Structures are given as structure tokens and as C-alpha cells.
Image (cartoon, rainbow, N blue to C red):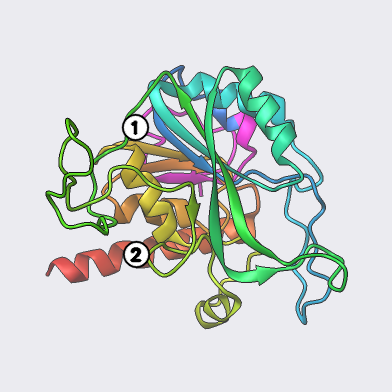
């Protein structure tokens, strides 16, 4: 079991492993400019509790607040030059997270708004709008262009000329909207029935297909994807399924064990598909 105080050599002992320990402590062992992509959902410090559910989740470790300025600085330090980083956030945390990431050195390019798999409440069920989307701060260190992918086809026929002097349209999109809603886009999170069916109960479990899209757009095959708050391992699964490597931490031993189980199953299924 990869716990604290191990002697580790980067990247050999970091690749394709999730460590059950504190994120900031772990990050100190990662060399400067060595991570090609960061994709993570840090605790927001909002003391989240789904008190209206039949089986309420316990509060996530760290959800009483992490040292976000230090996390932002460490993230910038370990990210490779000319690379992307994605940080999930919330509408009420966005200004503070934006400020911390910008002060750390990141260029904030946009905020993605991605439809959730199910509506969420934010306390006042009779006097507030239900939360239907995840917010994701999209950053750069230097500048990196998007990869060409086959994720989403253009609506216009390939070869269509829109303006004189411009290149004709391609079959697949190379520029994506900052709002991902509707059937053509993956949802940001799994709905409650998926969690019940798979026996995975986590208040913010992400849809690995959505994460795969971000990984394919912003990294190359074989690249290392870092997530310091792995939860039940969705980022690791998305990296595996996209032909990338992963590393990161999850401080909760309960969720860490679930992530290990999901990773084992994913690898077994991939081997079975290849046979």
C-alpha cells in the first residue's frame, strides 16, 4: 500500500500509482516542470453535506478548506511549460480560485461549464436554483494548442468554405465551446443510479468519459496526468483509457481502496478486449 514516507524516484515510482496521503506533501517530491497535464477537483472548503439524502455522505477530507494558494503555486511549479491545467470549482469559489491560480503564474484562458449527470441542490431547495453544471477553470503555463481529435464532428460538411481566404472546414472539431450541454457532449458527473448500480458512493464522482475528452484535447499519448484529489479514481481511469499515465493522491483510505479496485477492473477489461 503506497502510504507516506516512502523513498521514491521520479518518475519511476510515481507513474500509474495513487498514493494515500496529503496532496501538498506529495507534490513537494515532484520535480519542477515535469507534469504535462493537471486535471483535478480540489476540495472547495464549503463543508458539503447532502443532508436531504437517505444515506448522506460523510464530509470529504479537506472540505473544511485546503491551503489553496500553496496548492496553486505547487501546481504551477510542477506543470511543464506550454501545458494545460484544469481545476474544477464552484460558482461561489470561482473568484478566489481564479485569483490564487493567476497569482501563482497561470494564464487563465476560460471557464468551462459542463452539464452534470443529475441536478444538485445547494441548501435552499425552495428558494434557490438547482445546480446543473460543473465549473472548470482552464489554465495554461506558456501556450499549448489543442490536439486534433475525433471526439466531435463539425455540423457542416467537411470541405465547406465559410470565408474567403480561410481553410475549408474539417470533419472533426478542433475548437470546442466553453459550455458542454446536450447529447453530443459527455456529462461531467455520474447520476445517482449509476452510483447505486456500481456501488460507488462519492459526492463528486466524475464521469471518466468527460475527463477522457479533456485529456485527449490537452495531452499526448503516453503523457503523465496529475490529480492530487483522485477520489474514487476517475482521472486515473480516464488516463488509462486514453493511453496516458497517471499519478496523484487521495487522502481518504476508503476512497483510495475504491480507486484501486476500479483501476484493476479497468485494466482487466482492457486486456480482455485485446484478446
Quarter of the image containing the C terminus? bottom left
Instruction: Read off the residue under disc 2.
Output: 266
Outermost front residue: 164
- How far across and how far down the image is residue 207, in percent? 48, 62
Residue at 52% from the left image edge and 19% from the top image edge: 77
User: Upstream in the sequence, badge 2 or badge 1?
Assistant: 1
Confirm whether residue 222 shows in the render.
Answer: no
Task: State the CA–CA distance, disc 2 to disc 1.
Answer: 21 Å
Disc 2 element: helix
Q: Main secondary structure of the magenta part?
A: loop
- Residue 237 at least partly seen: yes
Compared to 97, does 271 lie above or below? below
Label 1, on which residue? 12
Position of residue 253 measured from the top left corner of the image (x, y, whole percent) = 63, 55
What residue appears at the point 17 percent right and 53 percent down from the top-left corner? Answer: 171
- Is 11 displayed left or right of 180 in the figure? left
- Tell me which residue sits at (78%, 68%) in the image: 50
Looking at this view, is 259 or 94 the one in front?
94
Q: Which residues are magenta?
A: 1-25
Question: Can you say whether 181 is above or below 246 in the image?
Answer: below
Amino acid at each position: 500500500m503506497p502510504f507516506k514516507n516512502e523513498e521514491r524516484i521520479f518518475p519511476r515510482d510515481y507513474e500509474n500509482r495513487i498514493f494515500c496521503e496529503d496532496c501538498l506533501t506529495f507534490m513537494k517530491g515532484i520535480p519542477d516542470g515535469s507534469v504535462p497535464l493537471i486535471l483535478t477537483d480540489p476540495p472547495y472548503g464549503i463543508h458539503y453535506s447532502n443532508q436531504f439524502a437517505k444515506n448522506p455522505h460523510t464530509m470529504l477530507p479537506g472540505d473544511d478548506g485546503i491551503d489553496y494558494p500553496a496548492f496553486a503555486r505547487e501546481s504551477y511549479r510542477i506543470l511543464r511549460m506550454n501545458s494545460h491545467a484544469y481545476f474544477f470549482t464552484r460558482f461561489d469559489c470561482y473568484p478566489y480560485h481564479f485569483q490564487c491560480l493567476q497569482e501563482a503564474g497561470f494564464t487563465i484562458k476560460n471557464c468551462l461549464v459542463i452539464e452534470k449527470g443529475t441536478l444538485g441542490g445547494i441548501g435552499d431547495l425552495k428558494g434557490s436554483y438547482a445546480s446543473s453544471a460543473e465549473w472548470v477553470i482552464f489554465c495554461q503555463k506558456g501556450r499549448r494548442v489543442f490536439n486534433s481529435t475525433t471526439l466531435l464532428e463539425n455540423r457542416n460538411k467537411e470541405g465547406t468554405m465559410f470565408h474567403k481566404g480561410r481553410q475549408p472546414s474539417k470533419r472533426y472539431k478542433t475548437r470546442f465551446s466553453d459550455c458542454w450541454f446536450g447529447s453530443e457532449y459527455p456529462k461531467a458527473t455520474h447520476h445517482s443510479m449509476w452510483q447505486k448500480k456500481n456501488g460507488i458512493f462519492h459526492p463528486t464522482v466524475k464521469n471518466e468519459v468527460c475527463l477522457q475528452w479533456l485529456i485527449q484535447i490537452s495531452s499526448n499519448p503516453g503523457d503523465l496526468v496529475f490529480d492530487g484529489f483522485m477520489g474514487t479514481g476517475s482521472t486515473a481511469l480516464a488516463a488509462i483509457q486514453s493511453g496516458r499515465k497517471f499519478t496523484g493522491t487521495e487522502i481518504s483510505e476508503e476512497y483510495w481502496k475504491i480507486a484501486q479496485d476500479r483501476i484493476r477492473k479497468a485494466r482487466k477489461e482492457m486486456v480482455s478486449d485485446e484478446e
